[in-house]
Amino acid sequence: MKFETKVIHAGIHSDPSTGAVMTPIFQTSTYEQKAPGKHKGYEYARTQNPTREVLQNNLAALENGKFGICFSSGLAAMDAIIKLLKQGDEVVSVNDLYGGSYRLLTKVYEQFGIESRFISMAKPNEIGAQLNKHTKLVWIETPTNPMLNLVDIKQVVKKVKEVNSRIIVCVDNTFASPYLQNPLDLGADLVLHSATKYINGHSDVILGAVITSKPKLAEKLYFIQNATGAIPGPQDCFLTIRGIKTLHIRVERACKNAKKIARFLLTHPKVNKVYYPGFKDHPGHKIAKAQMRDFGAMVSFDLKSESFADAKKVLSNTKIFTLAESLGGVESLIGHPPSMTHGSIPKEDRLKVGMTDTLMRLSVGIENVDDLIQDLERALTKL
């Protein structure tokens, strides 16, 4: 099946008990057993839930994987992956990543003896020299949050596996969504999503997912899912299944809007830099063109002014772009990563990757693009 058909049909069947076309919400905590151990495949809802099972199968199909494992949030999904490691192991991560991911690695797991190092992955040929006998997980985020840098997944995986084939490579695919990018096809072992974002797409669910084609990794992750219990509820699973059905249409429209908005910002006299992989002079443009179906709907920019107060004038004066955290919904959002999503990263580290005090991040939605441009124009006139 092509992607547009997968979102509606892959892993999804009419309910056998009623014929319902839409997957029912199985709002139950437990299941009847005819005798101890004799049941219909379901024992306890932390371990199995039919609504969650359908979502997991659907997500696996969208990423061309074999196994989907859902969690209560994107960070819960990441937490499960790190639990594949043990004391003394090391994570090597891209140095431009979501602030919550950075916080989990440095503030939670370092105290349990799992160290993390953050490096540039702009030159895959140099990755091998950054790994050592303790490296057990390589963490890729591409496009990165919020600087929209690109990592060549195929080349990084190749160089990592040349050093040690047992090192797990995971790609956080949240910014791209399965519609634009499929890391498993490029050699990654695991792909992670904050399904809160583009996958659900309606800003009404918190949910995470991991997809893989490796049976042993899947078995361990299913065990962790059950043993630690960070599962999504059936209502959230249902809403996510519903959101997925329009994923391709939503992302396609949002990408078209983002292109026009990025071009508008590029010529604005009060804007300093615009970060958008669709520009030919973007350092990751060729990589994005090779491994993505489009350039995404995220755009970051900063001001010629270096004053946070000026950034706040813009942030506080949009009417259609909502000032809020998160991304990937049908509505357009504007945010200030240094004080919001990436506040947990030290300022000196933020500045190293170009995250100035006036950097703003747009999650472009599916509204009329002319209205969105006028909204930004009005806000920028406040400077």
Image: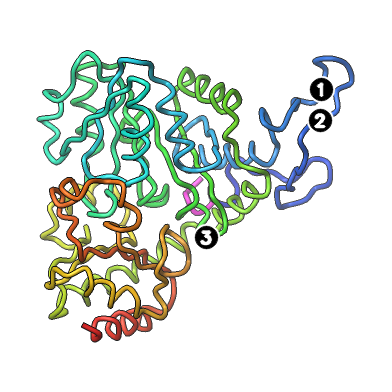
| Residue range of the region highlighted in magenta in the rendering | 1-6
Which of the marked residues, 1 or 2, is nearer the chain's N terminus?
Answer: 2
The residue that disc 1 covers is 39
Q: Secondary structure at mark 3?
A: loop
Disc on the earlier residue, 1 or 3: 1
Residue, disc 2:
31
- Residue at position x 24%, y 34% in the image: 154
Closer to the camera: disc 1 or disc 2?
2
Task: Let me know if residue 4 is in the magenta part.
Answer: yes
**Outermost residue to the right:** 34
Residue 359: within the magenta? Answer: no
Q: Position of residue 366 (x, y in %)?
A: 44, 71
Is 301 situated above or below 370? above
Where's residue 252, x and y in %? 40, 63
Instruction: Give the Cα distance between marks 1 and 3.
Output: 36 Å
Q: Are marks 1 and 2 in contact (CB under 8 Å)?
A: yes
| 193 or 165: nearer the viewer | 193
Residue corresponding to mark 3 = 203
Establish if 336 lies above or below 43.
Answer: below
- Rendered-image quadrant of the C terminus: bottom left
